[in-house]
Image: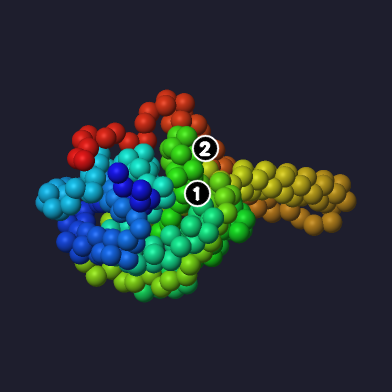
Amino acid sequence: MSTKKIFSIVVPIYFNELNIPHTVPRLQKLREMLTDYEVQLVFVDDGSKDKSLELLLDAKKLDDSIKIIKLSKNFGSMSAVQAGLHAASGDCVGIISADLQDPPELFVDMIASWEQGNKVVMATRSDRDESVSQKMFSNSYYYLMDKFAIKGYPKGGFDFVLIDKQVVNELKGISEKNTNIMSLIFWLGHNQDTFSYVRQERKFGKSRWTLSKKIKLFIDSFVSFSYAPIRFMSFVGVLTAVLSFLYGIFVIINAIFGGIELQGWTTLIGLITFLLGMIMVMLGIIGEYLWRILDESRRRPPYIVDEVYE
């Protein structure tokens, strides 16, 4: 019986047929670098409509250590990662994207850090070979996460990480939907270590990480980990009340003493439209919280497994 430790790698797959022929061999090469470990590859097909599943099944015919989880439809990358964590059996588990923008070889150093007692080893981005707009969105997102949600959050963010089996079990016990797995991993607060790298430009295929998905992740992260939106609403409400009270005193004084002739139509319309706009924004924020409460109360699973190939 093998006494080697098991290192599982979870890879969410969504329209990655051009990446898979390059990703699978590169992950398999890690066995040559990690001779003291059994390397298990767990691919989660998140409702791809291309040949991703077919290519994974072809690869599995040549490698019994490959495990494939097919979800019934596209549930999103965070749900796919959750499904992969439930299927992984490793003593430690790595999470990496299929597009090879993150270097799998860095897992060797990350495992060495894990062996020293760090239960969460994050690969953070010191820079990224991406467009200016993508860099601005990412940098702003991680800055706001650190400032208003989770203090000390890595400046460059991370979704390339290695975690201990204990952390995996804790994540399995957290059945939150509409959340950010990476933020949960950081929030758990275990011993952490970081490695910096430059995120490479995508060479194969087209990214499906659309603007709408980025906005959803942004909202999910702040609703799940920050009370800043609610505090913002309270602050605006108090500020508006104070200003309205002061303006009321100003109007009364001028009405009594006739100091200034008040032209109220333009002022009134401006105040009404401004306040209505603020009310709509606040209702939207409250709606985001209420929707998530409703979604959690229905207890629907975050994903549905259609088939498992192992």
Q: Nearer the viewer, residue 213 or 175?
A: 175
Q: Is residue 2 left or right of residue 109?
A: left
Secondary structure of the residue carrying numbered label 1: helix
Secondary structure of the residue carrying numbered label 2: helix
Which badge, 2 or 1, comes first in the chain's sequence?
1
Where is mark 2, residue-wise?
289
Q: Tell me residue 80's x, y (percent).
A: 33, 44
Residue 150 can be seen in this image: yes
Q: Is residue 292 left or right of residue 210?
A: right
Mark number displayed over residue 16:
none
Seen at 51% across and 52% down, the residue is 119
Dot 2 and dot 1 residues touching (CB under 8 Å): no
199 over 286 or under it: above or below: below
If the image is split into quadrants, where does the C terminus sit? top left
Residue 157 can be seen in this image: no
If the image is split into quadrants, where does the N terminus sit? top left
Q: Nearer the viewer, residue 98 or 149?
A: 98
Q: Residues within 10 Å of mark 1 (few under 14, many from 20)?
A: some
Where is mark 1, residue-wise?
185
